[in-house]
Amino acid sequence: MNLQTCIPAISGPLIQDKEDEPPSYFALTNPIEVEDKTFTEPSRFSNLLFVEQSKTQHVNLVSKRQFRKFFFPQITSKEWNDWHWQIQHRIRTYTQLSQILQLSYEEQIAIKRLGTRLPLSITPYYMGLLSRDNPMQPIRRTVVPTLSEFLKMPGEAEDPLGEETQSPVHGLVHRYPDRVLLLVLDFCSTYCRYCTRSRVVGHNAIYPSKSRLEKAIEYIEKTPTIRDVLLSGGDPLTLSDDRLEWIIKKLRSIRHVEIIRLGTKIPAVLPQRVTRSLVKMLRKYHPIFMSLHFTHPDECTEESYRACAMLADAGIPLGSQTVLLKDINDDVNTMKSLMHHLLKMRVRPYYLYQCDPILGSGHFRTPVEKGLEIIHGLRGFTTGYAVPTYVIDAPEGGGKIPLMTDYVVGHDGESYILKNFEGNIYRYPDQYVSRSKMIFRDQ
């Protein structure tokens, strides 16, 4: 069965000329309606299309090629590698998803009951990385809904980080004294089921109109303490080059804005978006930084390597922000493999986030002790560049709080008693000791 026949292309031009709206937004958000039909599962292809993976293995390249050949046989390589085509043909319905995956009962029920919750959206590229038969495959669990999303645990909230209370302008969060978070839009090409902003993304809650963005930029311009602006959302790289440049150019014209950062998952879920024209535009506005969202080694494909290389070659420092997720990346070997891949992609591991307590996230959250255990298993056992800072983004707008394993055992008044990565104890002489205990070296 040709999946392309049940995913109609979005009508209308991809780039719009309406002055008040970002050019690409209309094409990105038009709904795709598909008649609900029953499809014959291509079970005879299951062994050919997908190679089941352990938590630390790469996706088999042959499997990806066979995925495209079977489900999109009429699509050329040029079309497949066009990010516009990828976004236009996102998998968004139960019918489309069930044609590709053997859905478990929990997945089937969850997708049919989604309603106004976080939408389903997966790019064809990323879909090609998912296991067809195994609902417990780590990256499949991050993008395919399950019934667990409908269970509310104590302490969960729609806005656990209190962003709405720290928003002086719609879509702008001013939590720290010298930096702000500008939510450019609420659209992502692929929605993560543990998304911190699931209350707004995919629901047209943060519309990227020119008028709204101008109000946010005006606030930044009138607040001279702001030196660092992070563009996020949604994913800012889903905007067209022109509209993204319009925003960055406006910010760069403000004298007190020193650093512009972009938070994105594009290199993991839609690496085709990283084009020569994009990096050529970005390099005009240095210093530009990027925070990339990688979750599991299976996302570190040849295409992702290439996308990160293009960004790094353009002089853009890359950092990673990984969310700690239960039964997905919550063991030392998986996390170490991911961190090593990131370094090879020239992405510096930056943060390891404890999963935020959004509604329905209980099945993703690990005990805090698990995160400390992972950091302990990395520190000293691999290069320091591969060890991220483990943080909790504190509820009610408290900001990021770093968590460290207990390397300081005590202090006896003269020395710090320290424990190294192997558990051995060492004494370090404190600088401030009594002068009566000092001796000259020749004595």
Image (cartoon, helix red, strand yellow):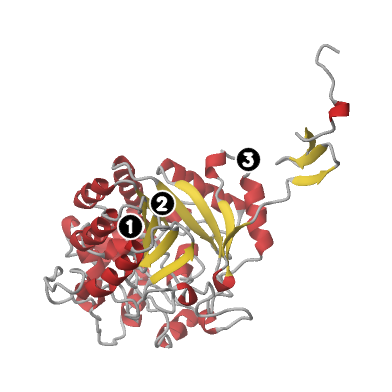
Determine if residue 133 is in view.
Answer: no
Determine if residue 219 is in view.
Answer: yes
Residue 5 x/y as whole percent: 20, 76
Q: Amino acid at mark 3?
A: Phe
Residue beneath label 2, please? 300
Left or right of 382 in this view: 2: left
Say few, some or many: other residues with alpha carbon within 10 Å of mark 1 (under 14 / 14 to 19 / 20 or more).
many
Q: Secondary structure at mark 1?
A: helix
Disc 3 or disc 1, which is closer to the eye? 3
Disc 2 or disc 1, which is closer to the eye? 2
- Determine whether 193 is above or below 438 in the image: below
- Determine whether 378 is above or below 97 in the image: above
* 3D distance between C-alphas at marks 3 and 2: 22 Å
Residue 232 x/y as whole percent: 37, 64
Say few, some or many: other residues with alpha carbon within 10 Å of mark 2 (under 14 / 14 to 19 / 20 or more).
many
Mark number, residue 425: none
Mark number, residue 381: 3
Disc 3 or disc 2, which is closer to the eye? 3
- Residue placed most toward the observer, 433 or 320: 433
Mark number, residue 64: 1
Quadrant hosting residue 393: bottom right
Q: What residue sits 29% from the left and 87% below the top?
A: 36
Residue 156 x/y as whole percent: 58, 79
Q: Amino acid at mark 2?
A: Cys
